[in-house]
Amino acid sequence: MKGTPQFPQCGFSSRAAQILQACGIQEFAYCNVLEDGAIREGVKTYSSWPTIPQLYVDGNFVGGADIMQEMYASGELQSILTT
């Protein structure tokens, strides 16, 4: 993400953190990509996803903030976070 869960540095990162918190996830691993340009670009290459933030659950790429929002609205995100 850009920033930290407590101090997100973009609207998408803020939304992603809020969605996770709404799912009952109060603590989660994150990487502030603004601190390292190589990580910022590397994560995009690794996932073949052009935007940040990116959500991974059990090492599997789920999607970005828009995908998280859609999955949250349908209940699918809550399901994968509680299994």
Image (tube, rainbow, N blue to C red):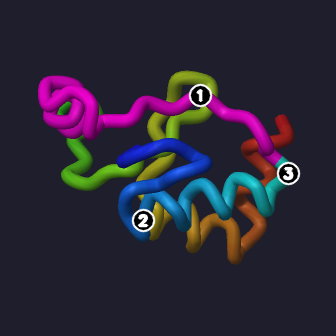
Q: Tell me where residue 23 sits by quadrant.
A: bottom right
Which residue is found at the position 25% from the left and 48% from the top?
Answer: 49
Instruction: Please say whether residue 35 is one of the residues in the magenta stretch.
Output: yes
Which residue is found at the position 58% from the left and 47% from the top?
Answer: 5
Q: Tell me where residue 40 sits by quadrant.
A: top left
Element type at mark 3? loop
Identify residue for label 1: 29
Q: Tell me where residue 28 sits by quadrant.
A: top right
Quarter in which the C terminus is drawn: top right
Identify residue for label 2: 12
Mark 3 and mark 2: span between their CA atoms? Answer: 19 Å
Element type at mark 2? helix
Question: Mark 2: which amino acid?
Answer: Phe
| Vertical placement of residue 18 versus 29, above or below | below
Mark 2 and mark 1: span between their CA atoms? Answer: 17 Å
**In the displayed structure image, the side of residue 5 where residue 34 appears, left or right:** left
Q: Which mark is residue 24?
A: 3
- Give coordinates of residue 81: x percent, y percent: 76, 43
